[in-house]
Amino acid sequence: MADMLTVQTAASALWFLPFAAPIGVWVALNDMARMKIPNKAVVALFVVFAVIGLVALPLADYPWRFLHLVVVLVIGFVLNLAGALGAGDAKFAAVMAPFIALQDVTMFCMLFAATLIVGFALHRTARAIPAVQRATPNWESWKRKKDFPMGLCLGAALILYLVIGALYGQR
């Protein structure tokens, strides 16, 4: 695993993790409950990167990471227009992008794919359990048969990426 993470150092992951993780959890829960990712969460994650990135990343890398945001935002916009992705999902994915080192993109995509498969299976299983339904009776994602709360997997993937970086990042 350590060989797969080339730029995301343990130090930078440790800087980002305590600030990004609560936002990732907020996004996951809110998307399951309301099928919406709040714009406040998108702005909060952007602010975390903009502020913490100044101390967590080498100054030469910091401005280039904003290009990640622009590229993912354009891709997300196109996917949203095609009906393949919600607008909130596209915006949140875009503000997640600067946290991902360019050299880690392939590993992150594999991590996101795994998170998507596991998240989908767990979500569909949980909504079929009566006790879960009773505990969260107003969750919109339980009612939607075709839609899926992608924020669940986006938030989880960001958190897992930072945890892996903190544990195995190059030192």
Image (cartoon, helix red, strand yellow):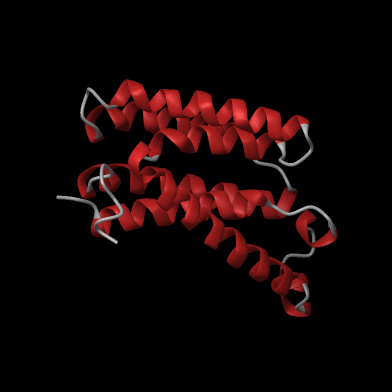
Task: Tally the numbered discs.
Answer: 0
> Percent position (x, y) of residue 120?
67, 63
Can I make out residue 163 in this image?
yes
Look at the picture and state if 156 lies above or below 65: below
User: Which residue is situated farthest in the left direction here?
Assistant: 171
**Left or right: 13, with 120 as reference point:** left
> Percent position (x, y) of residue 135?
72, 70
The quadrant holding residue 89 is top right
Front one among 17 and 150 = 150
User: Image point 66% across, 69% down: which residue?
Assistant: 121
User: Image point 43% across, 28% down: which residue?
Assistant: 47
The quadrant holding residue 100 is top left
Look at the picture and state if 152 lies above or below 40: below
User: Image point 41% across, 24% down: which residue?
Assistant: 66
User: Image point 78% across, 34% down: which residue?
Assistant: 82
Can I make out residue 38 in this image?
no
**Left or right: 81, with 9 as reference point:** right
> Percent position (x, y) of residue 1?
29, 61
